[in-house]
Image (spheres, rainbow, N blue to C red):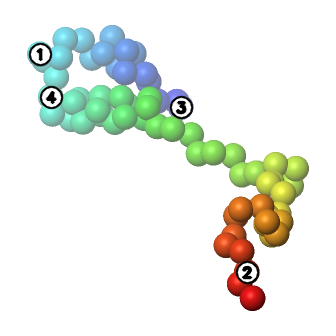
């Protein structure tokens, strides 16, 4: 059984003025669950970045060697 949405919960439970503490607790969790971010999918073999390469000499990415 799927959890109701916050709107469905409000429709079934009526006016918030008549709610008990447990109703507010349940409603709070329903609202929080609506905004949970799904985890990022794990990268597949084709999604990986190429291996890093050493900088080319004279490219400015490393100080020049001193004799």
The mark nearer the N terminus, 3 or 4, is: 3
Q: Position of residue 27 (x, y in %)?
A: 30, 29
Per the image, the residue denoted by label 2 is 65
Numbered disc 1: secondary structure: helix
Per the image, the residue denoted by label 3 is 1
Residue 4 visible in the snapshot? yes
Residue 66 as seen in the image, left or right of residue 31 = right
> Is label 3 in contact with label 4 (beta carbons under 8 Å)?
no
Image quarter of residue 64: bottom right
Kindly give the residue lying farthest to the right in the view shown. Answer: 46
Q: Position of residue 60 (x, y in %)?
A: 71, 62
Q: Residues within 10 Å of mark 4 (few under 14, many from 20)?
A: few
Spatial separation of the CA atoms under disc 3 and disc 4: 23 Å
Spatial separation of the CA atoms under disc 4 and disc 1: 9 Å
Q: Nearer the viewer, mark 2 or mark 1?
A: 2
Residue 12 visible in the snapshot? no
Per the image, the residue denoted by label 4 is 20
Picture disc at residue 17? 1
Spatial separation of the CA atoms under disc 3 and disc 2: 68 Å
Spatial separation of the CA atoms under disc 2 and disc 1: 76 Å
């Amino acid at each position: 059984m799927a959890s109701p949405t916050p709107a469905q919960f409000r429709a079934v439970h009526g006016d918030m003025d008549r709610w008990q503490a447990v109703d507010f607790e349940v409603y709070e969790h329903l609202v929080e669950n609506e905004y949970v971010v799904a985890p990022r999918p794990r990268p597949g073999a084709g999604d990986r970045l190429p291996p890093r390469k050493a900088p080319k000499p004279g490219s400015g990415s490393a100080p020049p060697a001193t004799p």
